[in-house]
Amino acid sequence: MDRLLARAVAEAAGLQPPAIYRLLGDKDGPLDAVAEHGFTAFLATKHVGPDPRDPVEDLRACWDVAVEYGLANPALYTPMCSEPTRTASASFKAGMEILMGRIRRLAASGWLRVDEELAAQIIHATARGAVLTWLSLPVHGRNPALLTTLRESMVAAVTSQGPSVQDAGRRAPLAPCAQRCPNRRPSAVRSNTC
């Protein structure tokens, strides 16, 4: 963390800059704390159904939730995903266990095309890459078909089902949360996350 950011965080907390480092450890401590908060908040948005009717649609919805969270929370998502070593977070690991459960259901249903570990890496990389790429683009250059195409490419790569989008076009990439996750908490509707 640079000195200007440490000073801003300290001022917002009503502390002197050295106190921030004492409370949160080394220079990366404050960013690690922000990332952990982001992972914890993201984990709270995940809907885990015990046995989805369609595990491939469940995978799409899971991917959409991850991407929507990143797009709705860029200030949290960037520190969460910009440092590869932040995968040691307890909340990150819990989220990956939820993902692995979805992948195991795909495998048990005969839908998994690749091994489970590779599937997790592809799903994680495409969602993370989609969000970071989208956020890096100028607003006028953001084509919603990018997100749809990445999601469907991920589905085609990890499942034995082909992509459902042959021509992504310039349409909205993600169904509204209320359509995909009708059983989620009302507070999630207000915050635009599932």
Image (tube, rainbow, N blue to C red):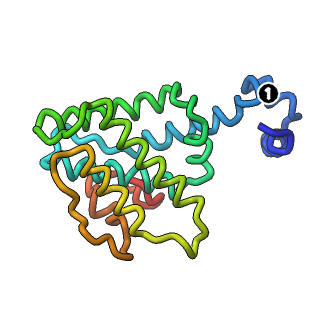
Q: Residue at x 74, y 23 (%)?
A: 25
The one of 171 and 161 positioned closer to us in this rendering: 161
Q: Quarter-wise, where is residue 172 in the image?
A: bottom left
Crowding at mark 1 (Cα within 10 Å: few <14, some 14-19, many 20+): some
Residue 164: x, y in percent? Answer: 21, 62
User: What residue is shown with label 1?
Assistant: 21
**Left or right of 34, for residue 153:** left
The one of 38 and 144 positioned closer to us in this rendering: 144
Q: Quarter-wise, where is residue 16 in the image?
A: top right
Whether residue 122 appears in this view of the structure is yes
Tell me the kind of residue under disc 1. Answer: Tyr
Location of the N terminus (image quadrant): top right
Residue 95: x, y in percent? Answer: 40, 34
Q: Residue at x 38, y 52 (%)?
A: 65
Residue 69: x, y in percent? Answer: 47, 52
Q: Is residue 58 above or below residue 116?
A: below
Helix or strand or loop: what does disc 1 sit on?
helix
Q: Is residue 8 above or below residue 142?
A: above
